[in-house]
Image (cartoon, rainbow, N blue to C red):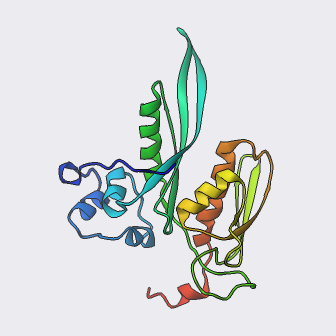
Amino acid sequence: MAEGVPTANIEEWKPRTKLGQLVKEGKITSIKEIFEKNLVITEPEIIDALLPNLKYEVIDIKMVQKQTDAGELSRYKVLVIMGNFDGYVGIGMGKAKQLRVAIQKAIRDAKMNIIPVRRGCGSWECTCGEPHSLPFTVTGKAGSVEVTLKPAPKGTGLVVGSVLKTLLSYAGIKDVWSFSKGETRTTENFIKAGYNALYNTYKFVTPADWARKR
């Protein structure tokens, strides 16, 4: 179930980076501008200021153990998916003794991993021109898992595993074909492979980019 992302108080925020200062001063007002200039986001408050309508969902919770001199230390490991259902998505991991703290860490990590997703209508069976699918085929890999996402005609839906369906929904993609191989039962690698595939949507230069001003 999607939940609203807790945000920091922007008025009380004291930026620690040059990018953060530019955002707080209003000199950068769009998240798109940050990605176009290939700037690195190192403060979650930047996302709070520029993408206030983010939602998140906890996908996986595990108990992990670490051997120490005092014995075994058990902690929660949480994986969350975050997005605005309109072209931006991120994933985050968090570990802590308390579940609530682990979720907060995962949310913070997901904000730092927000990426833009290029959407389009790349299926030869569909010529609607609306951004309901992908513009071309992309592939992502994590561990032994490899995921290939292919454009699909409007009305197809998300023909993917249930976990990836959540990721694509948060990115704003409604129709897609998929092919996966490897140990897809490993939720973390399955999600990361899908995330890497979405990241690769901006790896290629398309004819639409040729007209951009340099």
Q: Is residue 84 left or right of residue 65?
A: left
Name the residue at 26% across, 64% down.
22
Name the residue at 75% across, 85% down.
124
Q: How many marks?
A: 0
Q: Is residue 177 above or below residue 187?
A: below
Q: Is residue 203 left or right of residue 107?
A: right
Locate residue 139: give its quadrant: bottom right
**Looking at the image, which is closer to me, 190 or 21?**
190
Residue 142 image point, x, y percent: 69, 50
Locate residue 18: give its quadrant: bottom left
Residue 130 image point, x, y percent: 57, 83
Q: Is residue 207 left or right of residue 104?
A: right
Q: Is residue 164 left or right of residue 96?
A: right
Q: Is residue 57 above or below residue 98?
A: below
Locate residue 148: give its quadrant: bottom right
Q: Which residue appears farthest toward the top when viewing the image? A: 70
Name the residue at 55% across, 89% down.
210
Q: Is residue 86 visible?
A: yes
Q: Is residue 112 visible?
A: no
Residue 118 image point, x, y percent: 56, 73
Residue 107 image point, x, y percent: 44, 45
On the rendered image, what quadrant is the C terminus found in? Answer: bottom left
Q: Is residue 65 above or below residue 42?
A: above
Q: Which residue appears farthest toward the right when viewing the image? A: 181
**Looking at the image, which is closer to me, 209 or 150?**
150
